Amino acid sequence: MQPGHGHVSRLSAALRHRLITEDEVLRDTQDHHRFTAAEKWLQEVCWRRYWKGWLEMRPQVWRMWRHRVRELRAILPAEVLKKADAVAAGQSGVACMDLLARELIETGYLHNHARMWWASFWIHAEGLPWELGADFFFRHLLDADPASNTLSWRWVAGLQTPGKTYLVRLSNLEKYAHAGLLSDRSGSERIADGAVRPSIPKDHADTSRHPLSDFPTELPQGTGRAGLWLHADDLTPELGPLAKFTPVVVAAFTSERTYRDRYRLDEKRIDALRTVLTDGIARAEAHYRCPTALTDVTDTAAGIDLWARSQQLTEVVAFAPTVGPVRDLVPRLSTLLAGSGIRLTLIRRASDAHAFRLAASGFFPFWEKMIRSLRSGATG
């Protein structure tokens, strides 16, 4: 780590919303670098798809996390919630951890090492519920990804790989952190090597595997008036299976009420969502050369249904959202559109479908299979 994080790509927010796709990054990397030299970087890019695929087969883990966040806020003693708020505000008394909390709030970003250190501090040193720590990250990180965030916190807690925890150690910070992070050593004895002991919580989630949802990887032959619903899970429709689609209209939707009331997102995070959707809409307008709109609505599913009816659409097409807030809209949206006589068609990129199928168990079995795909050029 260096000040300003000069040794990291900072592509995470763009990849999260697919302003640039993993396929582009993987292809460009292999075009310019030998596989052995770039393998670690390729792994990091593929971790994102691995987490998504793992959660696609276990969507109940996401639902349980969201349930637990609401439940814990309702049942925890006031002094525990007060402590959680203080640690999240950078008032734990451990100066380096407090600096990281404030950096996240102020910038919407933390280096991956820092995310693990801070998550471990929250869970194992402060003894706070991992679900609320993951929620703090989800509300503030501009690159917050439902799968990567939820499952990384589970891993640090010792749940994702049962019994395997990640423990923050001062010597690790001394080795990898920039000097400024440790310029104030107040409270650092609390994270001295050996001071932090595992505090593995009960796993409330059912982690049994279910079949992947079956989405087409090519756009079926359609008839009538079709519109494109553009959402924050994939904002590059001009590349891939929707490139030759001919929508009559394109629309994206924000819901500041949902962002604030349901997910309690930070204002910077809300602004970032609006920014990426604006960018996606602009590129869609240039590519498809049809009317576009970005609209804020109180109820996203109802807003999409109203838009589709007002445009006299017979079909709404979109990339299949992955498990998370956008995917949670789909059951009700499907019902509303069907009631209006409108078909909802969700398309999955072939490279996602391929990678997700490989994510049934641990990362390294997944990676061994991905290596063969990468070398054969079979990932898109």
Image (cartoon, rainbow, N blue to C red):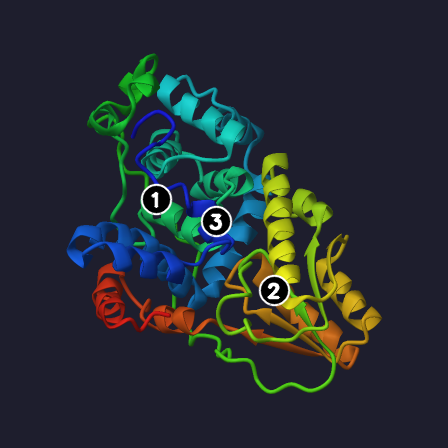
Q: Which residue type does callout 3 highlight?
A: Ala
Of pointers 3 and 2, the one earlier in the residue sequence = 3
**43 up-or-down from 183: above or below:** below
Quarter of the figure with residue 172: top left
Amino acid tagged 2 = His
Q: CA distance from mark 3 to mark 2?
A: 19 Å
Residue 287, numbered label = 2
Residue hosting label 3: 14
Can you say whether 86 is above or below 153 in the image? above
Q: Dot 3 surroundings within 10 Å: few (below 14), some, or many (20 or more)? A: some
Earlier sequence position, callout 1 versus callout 2: 1
> CB atoms at circles 1 and 3 under 8 Å apart?
no
What SS does tag 3 mark?
Answer: helix
Q: Position of residue 80 (x, y in %)?
A: 51, 30
Is label 1 in a helix, a strand or a loop?
helix
Up-down: is 69 above or below 106?
A: below
Report the mark closest to the observer, 1 or 3.
Answer: 3
> What quarter of the picture does the C terminus occupy?
bottom left
User: In terms of depth relative to the viewer, which is nearer, 329 or 83?
Assistant: 329
Q: Confirm whether residue 94 shows in the render.
A: no
Direction from residue 191 to residue 133 in the image, left or right: right
Q: Measured from the top left, where is residue 19 in percent x and y?
A: 51, 54
Image point (62%, 45%), residue name: 275
Q: CA distance from mark 1 to mark 3?
A: 27 Å
Can see residue 45? yes
Amino acid type at image mark 1: Ala
**Circle nearer the N terminus (1, 3):** 3
- In what element is the residue under mark 2? helix
From the viewer's side, name the closer residue of 11 and 159. Answer: 11
- Check disc 1 and report the residue beneath it: 157
Quarter of the image that includes the N terminus: top left
Name the spot of residue 71 as percent of width and height, x first: 57, 47
